[in-house]
Image: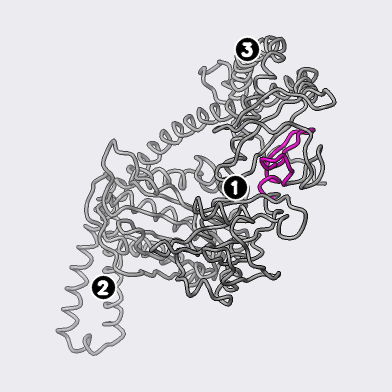
C-alpha cells in the first residue's frame, strides 16, 4: 500500500510566511493563525456538546417510549399507503381494461389471454382473467385452470362486485383459487345490463411491499384479513392462512398504535392500519422489552457517541478553519499580485517610452539616408556608365530595401508604444496577433519553428484595450517559443465562443508543464524556467489582464507533449461594478492531438 503523501493534502499557506510587521518585526505565519482559529472554534463548539450530552443522558429514557410510538405510527402509516397504492394500481389496470374494451372483445378468450399477458408483463402477479354475465355464468376465461360456472349467492366476490362495482377478496379458503386473491370489476353496459371482469392474483404479491419495510431487530410485520387469517408470512405467528393468537383490532379510519399483550403475557406495542377498499389489515408488532433494550444501548454507548461527535465536529472545524485561512491567504496573494502587476506595468510603460524615443531618434537619420541614397540612385541613373552597371545599381537597391526594413521596425515600435496607455477601442484580434508574430519572425526563422494562425468563422472587431491585448498575447507567444525546441510547432486558433465571446488557443508541442506546477503557473514569481531566466510575472500579469477585461484563461499541459493556453475574451468590455455573468467561470481546455497540429 502506498504511503500517504502529506504534501498533497497540506494547505497552500502551511509553509508560507510574510513579513507583516516590517523590518525587525515578527514573521506573519498563516499556520499560527490557523492553529489559533481551530482552538477557539473547538472550545466554542465542543463545550455545549459535552453539557448537552450530560443532560441528554438523564432525559433519554423518558423520551424513548414516546418516540417509539411515533415511529411505529409513521411506519404503519407509510407502509399502509404503499400497500393501498400497490393494490389500487392493479384495480385501476383492471378497471381500465373493463372500460376500454367492448363487450365483444372481453367475451373473447383470445383477447383475454392477450390482456392477461400484458398485465403480467407490466404489473406482475396476475394468474387468470374471466368474464361473468349478470347471472354469474362464465362468458370467457384466460388462465391456467378451468373455470366452472358460478351461481349468484355462492361467491361473495361476485355478489360484492355486483353490489359495489368492485370487490377485493383475501385468500383463506381450503385450497385452489380460494387461496389466491380475487379482484372483480363491474362493467355497466346500459339498460341494466352488465358484466363482471374478475382477475385472480397470486397472494404472494403482498410479500413485496411488506419486504420493503425497514424493521428493527425483533419487530414483526404482516398482513391479516378481517377474519384474523395471515395473508403474509410472520416471524412470530407462522405461515399464510394460519390464525394469529392476537385479537383483530377494531376498524379505524387512520393508523393506530395500542398497548396489548400476547396470550403468554408478553407486553407488546401493536400498530395497525386498515387498507382502504380491501379486507386487509397491516400489523406491526414490537416487544416492549426489546424496545427498551434497543433504546437503552445508546445510553451505555454515550461515551462512544460523544467521541464520534467530537471527531465529526473537529473534522468540520479543521475544514472550515482551513478554508477561511486559505481565503485570507488567497486575498493576500492577490494583493501582492496586484502590486507587482502595477510595478510590471510601469516597467513596460517605461520601456515603451524608451522604445518610442529610440524609434524617433532612428527615424530622423533614416529619412536623411533614404533621401541621400535616392539622390545617388537618381544621379547614377543619369549617367549611362553607372546605369549600365548592374552591380552598382543592385547595391543601391539593397541599401534602399534595408532602409525600408528599418522604417518598418521603427513603425512597429511606435505603434506598440502608442498603445501602452489603457484605452477602449475597436481592435482586429488577428491583426494584433500577426503583428506580434512579426516581431518574433527573426527568432522563428532562426530556430526553424513552424507557426500557424487559423481563424475559424467570422471574428468581429473587439472593443478592448489594445495595449493590454498586445501584452497578453506577447507573453503567451513568448512563453510558447521559450518552451519549444528547435523545429517545434506553434498553433494559434481564433474562433467565436458562446455568441458574444472569442476564444483563442495558443498551443505548442514543447516540453510541457509538470502536473504539480500547472496549478501555480498564474502565481506571481512562479516560473518553470531555469534559475535566473524570467521573473515569473508574465503569466501572473496575463491572468490579471484577462480577468480585468472580463475574460477567462485556462491551461492544459502534458510533460513531453506540450502546452495549450486558452483565452476567452468578450466582444464588448464588461460594465464596472457588475459581476461576471454566470456560466463564464474559468474553463480548462481539453487536450487533443488536433490542437497541436499545425
Which of discs 3 and 2 lies nearer the camera? The answer is 3
Residue 429, relative to residue 230: is it above or below?
Answer: below
Query: Residue 172's x, y, as percent?
Result: 73, 50
Residue under label 1, please give it.
Answer: 517
Most foreground residue, 312 or 256: 256
Secondary structure under badge 3? helix
Q: Of tags 1 and 2, which is closer to the observer? A: 1
Q: Which mark is residue 400?
A: 2
Q: Locate residue 337 relative to residue 562 in the image: left or right.
A: left
In the picture of the structure, the residue carrying the numbered disc 3 is 48
Q: Position of residue 510 (x, y in %)?
A: 56, 62
> How far apart are the alpha carbons under marks 1 and 2?
50 Å
* Residue 561 located left or right of residue 306: left
Which residues lie in the magenta part?
208-231
Q: Could you tell me how far apart the alpha carbons at marks 1 and 3 are, in whole angstroms? A: 44 Å
Q: Nearer the viewer, residue 437 or 518?
A: 518
Determine which quarter of the picture holds residue 498. Answer: bottom left
Amino acid at each position: 500500500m502506498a504511503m500517504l503523501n502529506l504534501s498533497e493534502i497540506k494547505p497552500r499557506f502551511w509553509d508560507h510566511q510574510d513579513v507583516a510587521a516590517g523590518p525587525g518585526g515578527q514573521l506573519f505565519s498563516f499556520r499560527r493563525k490557523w492553529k489559533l482559529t481551530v482552538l477557539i472554534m473547538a472550545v466554542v463548539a465542543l463545550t455545549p456538546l459535552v453539557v448537552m450530552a450530560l443532560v441528554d443522558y438523564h432525559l433519554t429514557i423518558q423520551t424513548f417510549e414516546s418516540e417509539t410510538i411515533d415511529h411505529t405510527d409513521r411506519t404503519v402509516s407509510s407502509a399502509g399507503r404503499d400497500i393501498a397504492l400497490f393494490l389500487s394500481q392493479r384495480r385501476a389496470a383492471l378497471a381500465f381494461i373493463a372500460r376500454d374494451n367492448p363487450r365483444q372483445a372481453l367475451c373473447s378468450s383470445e383477447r383475454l389471454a392477450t390482456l392477461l399477458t400484458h398485465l403480467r408483463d407490466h404489473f406482475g402477479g396476475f394468474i387468470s382473467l374471466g368474464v361473468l354475465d349478470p347471472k354469474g355464468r362464465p362468458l370467457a376465461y384466460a388462465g391456467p385452470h378451468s373455470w366452472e360456472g358460478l351461481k349468484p349467492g355462492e361467491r361473495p366476490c361476485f355478489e360484492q362486485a355486483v353490489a359495489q362495482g368492485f370487490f377485493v377478496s383475501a385468500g383463506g379458503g381450503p385450497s385452489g383459487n380460494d387461496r389466491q386473491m380475487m379482484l372483480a370489476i363491474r362493467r355497466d353496459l346500459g339498460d341494466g345490463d352488465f358484466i363482471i371482469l374478475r382477475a385472480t392474483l397470486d397472494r404472494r404479491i403482498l410479500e413485496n411491499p411488506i419486504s420493503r419495510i425497514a424493521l428493527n431487530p425483533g419487530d414483526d410485520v404482516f398482513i391479516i384479513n378481517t377474519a384474523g387469517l395471515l395473508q403474509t408470512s410472520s416471524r412470530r405467528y407462522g405461515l399464510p392462512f394460519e390464525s394469529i393468537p392476537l385479537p383483530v383490532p377494531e376498524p379505524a379510519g387512520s393508523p393506530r398504535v395500542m398497548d396489548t399483550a400476547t396470550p403468554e403475557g408478553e407486553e407488546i406495542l401493536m400498530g395497525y392500519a386498515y387498507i382502504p377498499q380491501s379486507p386487509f389489515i397491516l400489523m406491526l408488532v414490537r416487544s416492549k422489552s426489546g424496545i427498551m433494550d434497543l433504546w437503552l444501548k445508546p445510553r451505555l454507548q454515550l461515551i462512544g457517541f460523544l467521541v464520534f461527535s467530537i471527531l465529526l465536529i473537529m473534522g468540520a472545524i479543521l475544514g472550515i478553519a482551513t478554508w477561511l485561512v486559505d481565503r485570507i491567504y488567497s486575498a493576500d496573494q492577490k494583493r501582492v499580485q496586484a502590486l507587482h502587476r502595477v510595478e510590471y506595468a510601469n516597467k513596460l510603460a517605461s520601456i515603451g517610452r524608451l522604445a518610442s524615443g529610440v524609434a524617433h531618434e532612428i527615424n530622423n537619420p533614416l529619412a536623411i539616408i533614404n533621401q541621400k541614397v535616392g539622390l545617388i540612385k537618381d544621379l547614377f541613373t543619369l549617367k549611362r556608365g553607372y546605369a549600365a552597371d548592374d552591380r552598382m545599381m543592385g547595391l543601391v537597391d539593397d541599401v534602399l530595401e534595408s532602409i525600408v526594413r528599418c522604417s518598418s521596425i521603427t513603425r512597429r515600435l511606435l505603434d506598440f508604444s502608442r498603445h501602452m496607455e489603457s484605452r477602449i477601442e475597436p481592435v482586429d484580434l488577428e491583426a494584433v496577433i500577426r503583428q506580434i508574430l512579426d516581431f518574433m519572425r527573426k527568432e522563428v526563422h532562426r530556430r526553424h519553428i513552424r507557426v500557424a494562425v487559423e481563424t475559424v468563422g467570422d471574428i468581429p472587431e473587439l472593443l478592448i484595450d489594445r495595449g493590454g491585448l498586445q501584452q497578453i498575447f506577447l507573453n503567451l507567444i513568448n512563453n510558447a517559443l521559450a518552451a519549444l525546441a528547435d523545429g517545434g510547432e506553434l498553433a494559434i486558433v481564433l474562433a467565436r465562443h458562446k455568441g458574444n465571446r472569442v476564444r483563442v488557443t495558443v498551443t505548442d508541442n514543447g516540453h510541457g508543464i509538470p502536473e504539480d506546477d500547472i496549478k501555480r503557473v498564474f502565481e506571481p514569481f512562479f516560473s518553470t524556467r531555469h534559475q535566473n531566466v524570467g521573473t515569473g510575472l508574465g503569466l501572473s500579469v496575463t491572468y490579471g489582464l484577462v480577468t480585468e477585461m472580463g475574460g477567462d484563461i485556462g491551461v492544459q499541459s502534458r510533460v513531453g507533449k506540450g502546452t495549450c493556453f486558452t483565452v476567452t475574451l468578450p466582444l464588448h468590455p464588461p460594465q464596472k461594478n457588475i459581476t461576471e455573468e454566470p456560466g463564464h467561470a474559468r474553463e480548462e481546455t481539453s487536450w487533443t492531438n488536433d490542437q497541436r497540429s499545425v
